[in-house]
Image: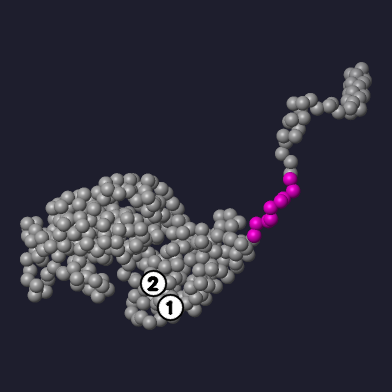
């Protein structure tokens, strides 16, 4: 009984204490307490617009692509380019040239389709893009085609603009490499290239005593089919591409490995020539550009590979003018389109051996001075006279007389 009264008394005292605590005024915050109070996050009202629903973005992107498709079908260059992003000068130059190709070679069919659309931000979207095309004036297996590629769009001024292939990029001195990591993953091949690109830069710039001021952009495509679809629809035999103001376009090898050092050195040499000539490609005869580029690539060739070319050209030097297989005269090489594939290949190899001869007989400095003279606007003959003290005809005669020594 006493225990029950004791418990009851303790309960009443507790109620009184609680009541007195609630009646006390709230304490005034100290300086430290006030800082803590105002440091707490607060829920601010939303000041940015709600993200556009993906369904609305899909509709807008498909509308952009439909308008691009219609512009291709009607060969309207300006209309098409109004839907192309201008923020990347390299892509803009490449895609403008691609569009001019279908203006010059009209298409009877062009159909484009987007799928797997995703947003990376309110202003950036990526998708897979397929297109199918057929030329109007040509027939045959190579007059039609198509491809699928991961692409990117940017929202600008309340509309979506096409920004081309969706690349991942990496840089080493002298180069910016573009490769695929979205659906197709070429990260392993890109790493292999990034490992050897500094060596290519060092070898080519040392050989020609010139380091380009501009970065060389290299775009790595998965196959020649994809490359030519993104370069020139009228040239289905393309396996690489290199033009002033554009990226160097290369592909993986047929077994899926990265292009080797010799291929990249060849194209980097060509890039160097473009810069020496101020972007004026026509200053070099096409066969001489090819021959110098091959010489740059040969910096990474084996001795046996070079010797096979030397011996082939040397053997042809002994053939009479009337022979079916003989060396070509340089004046026969004005128009590469008029030559067969075998004749173009022979012309390139001849020019490579001529550059090798200049190096061996007249020296590296004289060869480079001759190349710079041509890059500055001199003809090969004028450059020969100003640098070597002989005409191009005399150089050619001496070269042909020297060739048998290679056998």
What is the quadrant of the C terminus in the image? bottom left
Cβ–Cβ below 8 Å for labels 2 and 1? yes
Task: Choose between 82 and 130: the one closer to the eye.
Answer: 82
Q: Residue at x 45, y 61 (%)?
A: 91
Q: Is residue 49 left or right of residue 343?
A: right
Neighbourhood count class around disc 1 (C-alpha, 10 Å): few under 14, some 14–19, many 20 upward: many
Residue 51 counted in the magenta span? yes
Horizontal and vertical percent position of residue 283 = 30, 63
Residue with the mark numbered 2: 233
Sequence-wise, which precedes: disc 2 or disc 1?
Answer: 1
Q: How is the image coloured?
A: one colour
Residue with the mark numbered 1: 107
Looking at the rendered structure, the secondary structure element under dot 2 is: loop
Against 274, residue 336 (above or below) is below
Q: Residue at x 60, y 64 (%)?
A: 159
Question: Which residues are drawn in magenta?
Answer: 44-52
Q: Is residue 58 left or right of residue 182?
A: right
Task: Choose between 273 and 296: the one closer to the eye.
Answer: 273
What is the quadrant of the N terminus in the image? top right
Q: Residue at x 23, y 73 (%)?
A: 339
Magenta part mainly helix, strand or loop? Answer: loop
* Separation (CA) of disc 2 from disc 1: 9 Å
Neighbourhood count class around disc 2 (C-alpha, 10 Å): few under 14, some 14–19, many 20 upward: many
Residue 232 counted in the magenta span? no
Horizontal and vertical percent position of residue 297 = 25, 54
* Displayed quadrant of residue 8: top right
Q: Is residue 122 left or right of residue 173?
A: right
Horizontal and vertical percent position of residue 377 = 29, 61
């Amino acid at each position: 009984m006493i225990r029950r009264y004791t418990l009851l008394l303790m309960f009443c005292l507790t109620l009184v204490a609680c009541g007195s605590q609630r009646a006390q005024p709230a304490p005034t915050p100290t300086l430290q307490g006030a800082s803590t109070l105002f440091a707490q996050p607060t829920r601010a009202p939303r000041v940015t617009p709600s993200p556009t629903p993906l369904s609305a973005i899909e509709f807008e992107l498909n509308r952009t692509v439909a308008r691009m498709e219609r512009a291709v079908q009607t060969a309207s260059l300006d209309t098409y380019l109004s839907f192309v992003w201008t923020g990347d000068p390299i892509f803009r130059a490449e895609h403008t040239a691609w569009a001019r190709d279908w203006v010059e070679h009209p298409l009877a069919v062009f159909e484009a389709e987007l799928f797997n659309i995703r947003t990376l931000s309110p202003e950036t979207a990526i998708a897979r893009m397929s297109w199918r095309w057929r030329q109007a004036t040509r027939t045959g297996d190579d007059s039609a085609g198509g491809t699928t590629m991961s692409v990117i769009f940017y929202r600008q001024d309340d509309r979506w603009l096409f920004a081309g292939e969706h690349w991942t990029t990496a840089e080493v001195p002298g180069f910016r490499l573009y490769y695929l990591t979205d659906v197709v993953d070429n990260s392993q091949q890109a790493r292999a290239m990034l490992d050897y690109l500094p060596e290519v830069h060092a070898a080519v710039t040392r050989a020609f005593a010139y380091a380009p001021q501009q970065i060389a952009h290299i775009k790595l495509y998965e196959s020649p089919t994809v490359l030519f679809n993104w370069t020139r629809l009228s040239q289905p035999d393309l396996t690489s591409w290199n033009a002033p103001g554009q990226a160097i376009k290369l592909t993986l090898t047929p077994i899926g490995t990265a292009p080797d050092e010799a291929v990249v050195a060849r194209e980097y040499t060509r890039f160097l020539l473009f810069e020496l000539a101020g972007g004026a490609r026509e200053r070099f005869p096409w066969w001489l550009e090819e021959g110098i580029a091959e010489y740059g690539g040969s910096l990474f060739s084996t001795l046996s590979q070079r010797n096979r070319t030397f011996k082939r050209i040397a053997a042809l030097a002994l053939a009479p003018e009337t022979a079916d297989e003989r060396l070509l005269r340089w004046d026969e090489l004005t128009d590469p389109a008029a030559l067969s594939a075998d004749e173009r290949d022979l012309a390139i190899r001849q020019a490579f051996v001529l550059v090798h001869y200049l190096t061996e007989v007249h020296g590296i400095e004289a060869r480079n001075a001759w190349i710079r003279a041509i890059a500055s606007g001199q003809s090969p003959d004028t450059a020969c006279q100003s640098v070597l003290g002989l005409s191009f005809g005399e150089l050619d005669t001496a070269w042909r007389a020297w060739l048998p020594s290679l056998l």
